Image (cartoon, rainbow, N blue to C red):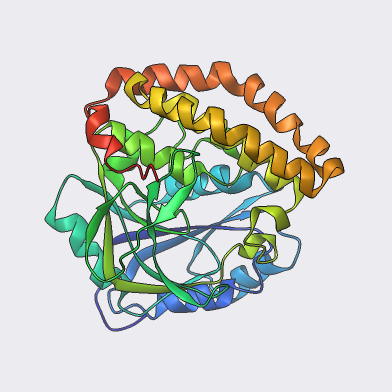
Amino acid sequence: MADGSACEVSVAIANWNGMKYIGRCLAALYAQTQAPAEIVVVDNGSTDGSREWIADNFPYIKLLLNEENEGFSAGYNRAISACTHEYILVLNTDVFVEADFIEVVLPALQRDSTIGAATGKVYQQATGEWLNSGFFLRPQMRTRHSAQTEKPEQVFGCSGALILFRRAALADLVVDGQYFDESYFSYGEDVDLAWRAQLLGWKSWYTPRANAVHVGSGSSNEQMRFVDKPLFLQRHILKNRYLTIAKNASWPELIPLIFYWLISEPLVWFILFVRSPRRCIHLVPSLYEALRLMPRAMRWRREMQARRVLGPGQRMRLIKWI
């Protein structure tokens, strides 16, 4: 690692067939001016040789092996649980942080004890643009990157590809022993976690000088658009939107959100049907799966609503209604 002294930062990575990216990702971490104290990689049943390559080339990394792909949420939950330091950088294998990333982003959490998560500015390789990796929430349970990239700001949440967490915040957000909800498998788990953080009064912060490159959808062959993703991921994306709103929205938030959904959701399914009727039929099980998981979601909802400290009015200003 670089000459900078190690700091109280652990890095948590979940790898699934990430051979194309993992070498560059780890090399960027080892080049940090403020070196992480440890790197934990959970391999989610990779079959491309990446788990063996990591073991051979980075023997000091804490490498934990899952026998099958248990999903983003389960992989990162195991990685986070194995981390031992005060701050935890959750990082995707297709994200390559610049050499001073930790040095620049860490002070945001050190200055303000109410900030639970922080992120930086990302060059999105697939689109060729710099993005604020913090996001605001849209009423359809989609995210919108902030339009501004040059000033620090509070955001609704941070993209799951690149987040520096305060351990105390993560510990506060645990339900059923899970940080990320493992029923999500993949996609939308960062929105759900950010909303829970909002409920408990934890802020999320954007730091523009902390830069990184993100390939985007590296685990799904760089297929960024919903319509291009594999069918099983599309099902999870649709299912997870329903679970997120059911779990987290207070009644003052639900009323306007339901209004938007009554208009937008039939349109979503109509567009999916027009684009590909046969594929749309295979997406219908996402509705059943959401209903099957709803009792569990309601249990999570009761726990979080009972513990909430921030009123809905304070959260709703971080939802972009237009």
Q: Is residue 176 visible?
A: no
Count of residue discs: 0
Q: Nearer the viewer, residue 77 or 126?
A: 126
Q: Is residue 141 visible?
A: yes
In this rendering, position of residue 180 left or right of residue 72: left
In this rendering, position of residue 315 left or right of residue 181: left
Q: Nearer the viewer, residue 301 or 59?
A: 301
Q: Residue at x 29, y 36 (%)?
A: 316
Q: Residue at x 57, y 66 (%)?
A: 216
Q: Is residue 211 above or below residue 71?
A: below
Q: Quadrant of residue 1?
A: bottom left
Q: Is residue 8 above or below residue 57?
A: above
Q: Nearer the viewer, residue 321 or 304?
A: 321
What is the x, y in percent for residue 78?
A: 51, 45
Q: Quadrant of residue 32?
A: bottom left
In this rendering, position of residue 48 left or right of residue 51: right
What is the x, y in percent for residue 317?
A: 26, 40
**Residue extending furthest toward the left:** 111
Q: Is residue 203 above or below residue 260?
A: below
What is the x, y in percent for residue 138?
A: 43, 43
Q: Is residue 286 above or below residue 155?
A: above
**Residue extending furthest toward the right:** 278
Q: Nearer the viewer, residue 116 or 141?
A: 141
Q: Quadrant of residue 285?
A: top right
Q: Residue at x 14, y 52 (%)?
A: 112
In this rendering, position of residue 180 left or right of residue 150: right
What is the x, y in percent for residue 269?
A: 69, 37
